[in-house]
Image: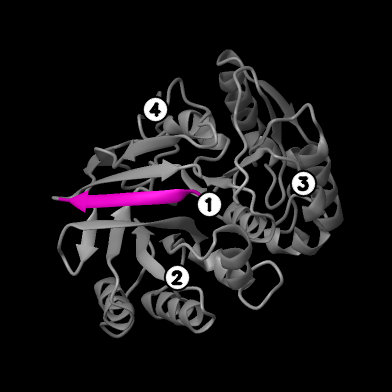
Amino acid sequence: MITYPILEKSATIGVTAPSSGVEPELHDLVKLSCSRLEKQGFRVICGDTVWTQKKAKSSLATKRAHEFNGMMQDDTIDLIIPPWGGELLIEVLDKIDFASLKNKWILGYSDTSLLLLATTLKMGLATAHGTNLIDLRGEYSDETTSMWKSVLSTEAGASIKQYSSIKFQKKWQHDQPSPCVFHLTESTIWKTVPGDKVKAEGRLLGGCIDIIRHLIGTPYGDVQNFRKKFINNDPIMWYLENCELKTTDLRRSLVQMKLAGWFENTSCIMFGRSTANEPVEGYTLEDVYQDLYTELQIPIVYDIDCGHVPPQITFVNGAYGVVEVEDGKGTLVQHFK
């Protein structure tokens, strides 16, 4: 069985940096994000790791793990949100006391998705792939992003529905702050291979493929054990997003996942929008998706609201999802069962 935390009103949010911390010149962004959340009724506690950054990490792996473990074991903290992702979260995995993690949400994406997926696979604790702290600094959030609170407030046994966004952000414009942080200018269109309407269901798992592929072959990436122990061999629906990989590296990563058995009994694979996916010798992203479909003979859905091209739907690792796509629009229902 999957264990589902629940976010209560007036909850306390713990902010810690298991990957990258925040440079001094950007501390105001953290403070602004915290103040926005406090105005919504939350209490926010920031750990020491949030305020430091050196050599691609917030601090030593032992310190990062110690602070994360402490917040996860602290009964007064209800939700963990890192400030953002980073590069080297993988250094802390073997220092996390997974067996002592209490029933609370961890929310984030990018490098944080490594921690999210490892926690769900190892402990059967649902985790939330969605907004990070820094992107909550706006006067308000767009309809897609703002669903994080509703999703995390859903009770075990209940369901929640989310919709594809109307517009997405083509590029970051940090020099032109907007009231909702994102500049949503481009029409969102969910696409499919082989091009038909899609309806699929299964247990949701995923994250940033650049990062989560490094769990393969480790004690933190045992998908087969997760199937048997926590989901009674239900089918899996993978959601993936590519931050920096060229098409050939993406293809290698997907083949590795297939060879590791991650795609056994998979009903659908979904891919987020990306500014990466640079073609190599004419090998395009569409070729990658077509090759994957040809091999697995399951629906491929792409350009969904997930990852580094916002806004983001909040995907819950471990939840039973039902996705439907037709005429470029998509819905995701997540059942907390």
Question: Which label sits in the foreground, 1 or 4?
Answer: 1
**Stretch of the chain drawn in magenta:** 318-326
State the predominant SS element of the stretch in magenta. strand
Q: CA distance from mark 1 to mark 3?
A: 16 Å
- Helix or strand or loop: what does disc 4 sit on? loop
Q: In the image, what residue type sits under mark 4?
A: Ser
- Label 4, residues with CA under 10 Å away: few <14, some 14-19, many ≥20: few
Say which of 161 and 77 sits in front: 161
Q: CA distance from mark 1 to mark 4?
A: 31 Å
Q: CA distance from mark 1 to mark 2?
A: 23 Å
- Label 2, residues with CA under 10 Å away: few <14, some 14-19, many ≥20: some
Say which of 157 and 69 sits in front: 157
Q: CA distance from mark 2 to mark 3?
A: 32 Å
In the displayed structure image, the side of residue 60 where residue 330 appears, left or right: left
Q: Earlier in the sequence, mark 2 or mark 3?
A: 3
**Residue 206 can be seen, yes or no:** yes
Label 2 sits on residue? 245
Label 3 sits on residue? 101
- Helix or strand or loop: what does disc 3 sit on? loop
Q: In the image, what residue type sits under mark 1?
A: Asn
Badge 1 vs badge 3, beta-carbon distance below 8 Å: no
Q: Which mark is residue 317?
A: 1
Question: Which label sits in the foreground, 2 or 3?
Answer: 3
Residue 263's x, y, as percent?
45, 74
Residue 24's x, y, as percent?
70, 37
The residue at 39%/64% (across/down) is 276
